[in-house]
Amino acid sequence: MSKAAKAMDVEEPLQPDDGAIEGHREIGDTELKAIAEALIFVADEPISSKLIADVLKLEREAVETAISDLAREYEARNGGLQLREIAGGWQIATRPEHHEQIRAYLKSRPSAKLSLASLETLAVIAYKQPVTVPEILEIRGVQSPSAIKTLLDKRLIVAKGRKETVGRPMMYGTSKDFLIQFGLKDLSELPSIEDFQDLAGGEA
Amino acid sequence: MEDTAQTDNPTPATAEASAEAAPTISVIGAHPEITPDGDSDRLKITLGEFEGPLDLLLYLIRQEQVNIYDIPIARITDEYLHYLNLMQELDLTVAGDFLVMAAQLIELKSRMLLPRDPLAEAEEVLDPRADLVNRLLEHEKFKAASQMLWSRATVEQAVFTRAEIETDSNNPEVAVGLFDLLRVFQEILARHKEEVMMEIEREEVTMAEMIERLRNMVRSAGELNLVAFFERAGSRRGLVVAFLSVLELVRMSEISLVQRETFGEIIARATNPA
């Protein structure tokens, strides 16, 4: 009952506009920014500029310009929210510095982290993908069957087909969830593995 | 955000690594020690978090303060075997991976003892340790990478997005089970019990009439709140007939029952709206 009423409320003011969108009504810059912001807010997952452009039947470039303007505004305002690019899309989220107050309100605690073994396995897969179990063993020096299972269960990695070699072992790579959970735009945002040389061996 | 990820590194290993002399390397949380356990004559052993033989080797190299590019194989091998013995004495199952590394170290040690082949070309004389060093460095890089991932995940966990918006797709109507129906029925029966019973005349509603009434009500409105329907049934006997007629129409698949939330109201719907 209440849901139906809610839907009606939303529909009514939109009705006169509907026809206009069909007829490619001109959307001004300010309005485009506002609409893009609304879509990013409503989207359950990071939403790509292409998807926004498709919904609005607009050029992708126009949408991208609007979003970068919007991102600058968010940055300048320095408020409680950030507009950020993650996993190939845009997302509105809180800033990490306010996590204590937010957790106090949500009554939530940081959830269980990955074990050291799972984390190491994930690091190898992230940098070497697509990679097989024997190749992971070579780098880690230990078997990691339970770590692979944990990572699959948490949807951080996905199977990427079989390698055409002896035994046709399964290859693994990271998933979109991996990008989201580690706050990455895409895989290229991972620091280069060679950068860890300094930490590892000192002067090479 | 980038900055936070870099500086917000909670594990001490990295900090140590930068503070120490460059040639030595660090490994996460490895300080095995044996200490008396309270007043009893037992000993308590604390083992480091060695994920595998490479971790153990890195730890030993660091502890011995030797250059990773010039590992004194004989000394490190002895240390390594000593550690394995300790593990065995403690009845810890030593994983096969550790034994494989022990064998490789011993082989390496013997190759280091052999004199160089005087006939071999200069380029062919490779340091027999090169493979091991590369593996250790590679392993250490990935340990550092996993620490980086750890801190990234920690920062990400401090970032929140909005709560889920209620839509039709993420709030599917729950199919109703028989027990839900019984529960609703019982609630209404209980409510009736509380009322003062003043049955003046015995009303006789037959099953067929009740089915017809329910069918018409569902058809005309499209859907019908069962609570309202039961409430209108009047007497106790009427309620029983009403309940049975609901069951009958469901059995004949003329209506379906849906519930929008657990313990919510049950709605009867015509399956094929006439």
Image: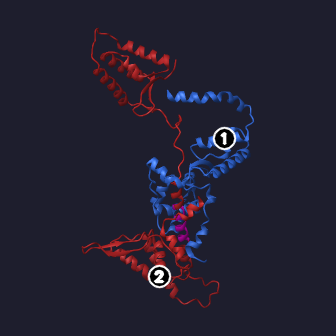
Chain colours: A blue, B red
* Percent coordinates x, y for residue A140 in the rendering: 50, 67
Q: Which amino acid does label 2 sit on?
A: Glu
- Say if labels 1 and 2 share a chain: no
Which SS class for mark 1? helix
* Marks 1 and 2, how far apart at CA: 62 Å
Please tell me which residue is depicted at 74% across the width and 33% down the height of the picture. A25
Please tell me which residue is depicted at 72% across the width and 30% down the height of the picture. A20
Q: In which quarter of the image is residue A34?
A: top right
Residue A165 highlighted magenta (yes or no): no
According to the picture, the residue beneath numbered tag 2 turns out to be B64
Q: Can residue A158 be seen in this view?
A: no
Which SS class for mark 2? loop
A182 displayed left or right of A27 = left
- Front-most of A27 and B229? A27
- The mark found on residue A125 in the picture is none
Q: Is residue B47 above or below residue A67?
A: below
Q: Quadrant of residue B207?
A: top left
* Percent coordinates x, y for residue B266 in the rendering: 42, 27
According to the picture, the residue beneath numbered tag 1 turns out to be A34
- Front-most of B242 and B96? B242
Q: What residue type is labelled 1?
A: Ala
A135 displayed left or right of B29 = right
**Badge 1 sits on which subunit?**
A
Considering the whole magenta stretch, tell me its main secondary structure.
Answer: helix
B179 displayed left or right of A44 = left
Around disc 2, counting alpha carbons within 10 Å, would you say few (fewer than 14), some (14 to 19), or many (20 or more)? some
- Mark 1 and mark 2 in contact? Answer it, CB < 8 Å: no
Around disc 1, counting alpha carbons within 10 Å, would you say few (fewer than 14), some (14 to 19), or many (20 or more)? some
Tell me where the magenta segment starts and ends, as one range. Answer: B138-150
